[in-house]
Image (cartoon, rainbow, N blue to C red):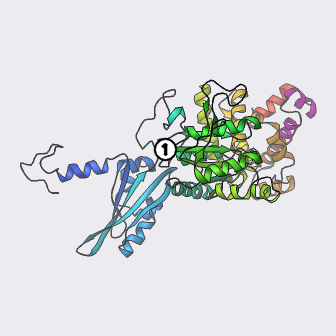
């Protein structure tokens, strides 16, 4: 659109919008990002919103090949080569979940460039301030007070497994199929369930959780389906709506679905098939439109095999499966998670902890993390409760970590191998002796469960002598 002299330059209903202002508005749209390249793939323009996400300056990108500066947009090379656009590609860019359209730019049939249009899929966008704590921070609204606090950007991890999982989540979220989330305890199954709801077309509706293991068996049916007044002794006046009714037009999250009693499984199956609810004590039925996301840390196929879980219900729930890997299978995410939890507890405790020592980082990457991300969070919180400085040290870790990684850990270095490795790296005798002394002290701390007096006694040295050695070796 060309700006002609005398044209009304205001954003009104009359007159043309100046081309430069139109382009500026497009490139300043915080909900989307744009990057434009020439026929050789060299970046000519990039929007501020995209620069914010990539955490670089615009000068870093302009005039440089997109393959070097933005490897996320590798598909743009194919669009330049074929001239065929590609739409709706789900990707994760710097931890942000996005959908990308790749569009060729042509002039009289000749490909002169291409653009990548990035749509940010999170409720918050680059440059948008989050509400203050206590004022609905991170909360996506839902009816009856049932909402979610988390979305896909709260799922931390840059490992290939987590990137694939997040891309799959964004693909399935807008659909209406039931989802079964599997994984060990502490991997974040509820976080994924909330993220599915937040990215779905039902996000304006309620997100209702039912923990199938936390509710007494005799109350589960009324919890699911509700009851009429007088349905049983102790029932409330006026009756009560069930969780499946409250979740109408939204999502119901069935946590620990493997603990659902066999007798109730048949009624849940009937609801999934027909969408009909019949309250206890009522002869009437009505329809509730919900999407079911279930989660379990047990092998449902084994339960089906031993007739402890209905096969037909299993297949109704397991339309789409998301299996969350344990932390030990994605160790490259540990540093990112540690930094996140340190930031979290710095805000909570009003501390200024800078990070963990190299020794702690090594221990954390060797540990098997049977409690997964939840255990890692607990370890960081424990350290905040006992540390005195601004660095988390081995002495701040629970004995379970030290025991596995220092003494009996399957990945712990053998002393002879460690010495040989140190010599090959050109370390001096004094440096090697310091490392060996540090291992001995750590082992003694583990045996004495962190008690300094017992540790000194075990090593047959004075407490001041122990503190001096720990200070020298960076253990205090």
Give x and y (percent) for residue 8. Answer: 10, 45
Q: Is residue 322 visible?
A: no
Give x and y (percent) for residue 167. Answer: 54, 57
Task: Kindly identify which residue carries mark 1.
Answer: 203
Whether the magenta-drawn stretch holds residue 6 is answered as: no
- Res 148 → quadrant: top right
How crowded is the residue under tag 1: few (<14 C-alpha within 10 Å), some, or many (20+)?
Answer: many
- Res 469 → quadrant: top right
Range shown magenta: 440-458
Disc 1, SS: loop
Above or below, 470 against 359 in this view is above
Q: Is residue 80 visible?
A: yes
Residue at x-position 66% and y-position 37%: 280
- Of 348 and 184, nearer the camera is 184
Quarter of the figure with the C terminus:
top right
Whether the magenta-drawn stretch holds residue 454 is answered as: yes
Residue at x-position 83% and y-position 43%: 439
- Of 298 and 316, nearer the camera is 316
Residue at x-position 89% and y-position 37%: 447
Please, which residue is most extreme toward the left here? 6
- Res 38 → quadrant: bottom left
Locate residue 6 relative to residue 104 in the image: left or right. Answer: left
Locate residue 17 relative to residue 72 in the image: left or right. Answer: left
Give x and y (percent) for residue 452. Answer: 84, 28
Residue at x-position 81% and y-position 52%: 412
Give x and y (percent) for residue 357. Answer: 69, 40
């Amino acid at each position: 659109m060309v700006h002609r002299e005398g044209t009304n330059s205001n954003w009104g209903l009359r007159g043309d919008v100046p081309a430069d202002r139109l382009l500026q508005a497009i490139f300043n749209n915080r909900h989307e990002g744009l990057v434009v390249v020439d026929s050789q793939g060299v970046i000519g323009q990039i929007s501020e919103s995209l620069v914010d996400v990539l955490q670089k300056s615009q000068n870093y990108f302009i005039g440089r090949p997109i393959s070097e500066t933005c490897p996320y947009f590798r598909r743009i090379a194919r669009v330049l080569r074929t001239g065929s656009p590609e739409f709706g590609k789900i990707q994760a860019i710097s931890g942000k979940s996005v959908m990308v359209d790749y569009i060729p730019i042509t002039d009289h049939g000749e490909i002169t460039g291409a653009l990548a249009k990035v749509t940010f899929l999170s409720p918050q966008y680059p440059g948008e301030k989050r509400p203050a704590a206590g004022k609905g921070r991170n909360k996506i609204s839902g009816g009856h007070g049932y909402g979610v606090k988390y979305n896909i950007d709260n799922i931390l991890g840059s490992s290939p497994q987590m990137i694939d999982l997040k891309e799959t989540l964004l693909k399935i979220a807008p659909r209406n199929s039931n989802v079964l989330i599997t994984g060990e305890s502490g991997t974040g199954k509820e976080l994924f369930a909330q993220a599915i709801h937040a990215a779905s077309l039902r996000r304006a509706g309620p997100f209702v959780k039912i923990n199938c293991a936390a509710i007494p068996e005799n109350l589960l049916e009324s919890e699911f389906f509700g009851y009429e007044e007088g349905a049983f002794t102790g029932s409330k006046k006026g009756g009560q709506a069930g969780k499946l009714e409250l979740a109408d037009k939204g999502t119901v999250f069935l946590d620990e679905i493997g603990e659902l009693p066999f007798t109730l499984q048949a009624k849940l199956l009937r609801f999934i098939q027909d969408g009909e609810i019949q309250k206890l004590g009522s002869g009437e039925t009505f329809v509730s439109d919900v999407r079911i996301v279930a989660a379990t840390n047990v092998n449902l196929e084994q339960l089906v095999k031993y007739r402890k879980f209905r096969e037909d219900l299993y297949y109704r729930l397991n339309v789409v499966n998301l299996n969350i890997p344990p932390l030990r299978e994605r160790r490259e995410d540990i540093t990112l998670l540690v930094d996140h939890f340190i930031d979290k507890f710095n805000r909570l405790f009003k501390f200024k902890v800078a990070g963990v020592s190299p020794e702690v980082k090594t221990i954390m990457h060797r540990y098997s993390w049977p409690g997964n991300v939840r255990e890692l969070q607990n370890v960081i919180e424990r350290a905040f409760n006992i540390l005195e400085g601004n660095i988390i040290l081995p002495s701040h870790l629970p004995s379970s970590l030290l025991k596995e990684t220092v003494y009996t850990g399957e990945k712990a270095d053998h002393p002879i191998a460690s010495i040989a490795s140190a010599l090959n790296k050109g370390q001096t005798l004094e440096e090697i002796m310091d490392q060996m002394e540090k291992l001995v002290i750590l082992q003694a701390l583990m045996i004495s469960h962190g008690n300094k007096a017992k540790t000194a006694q075990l090593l047959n040295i004075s407490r001041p002598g122990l503190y001096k050695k720990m200070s020298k070796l960076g253990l205090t």
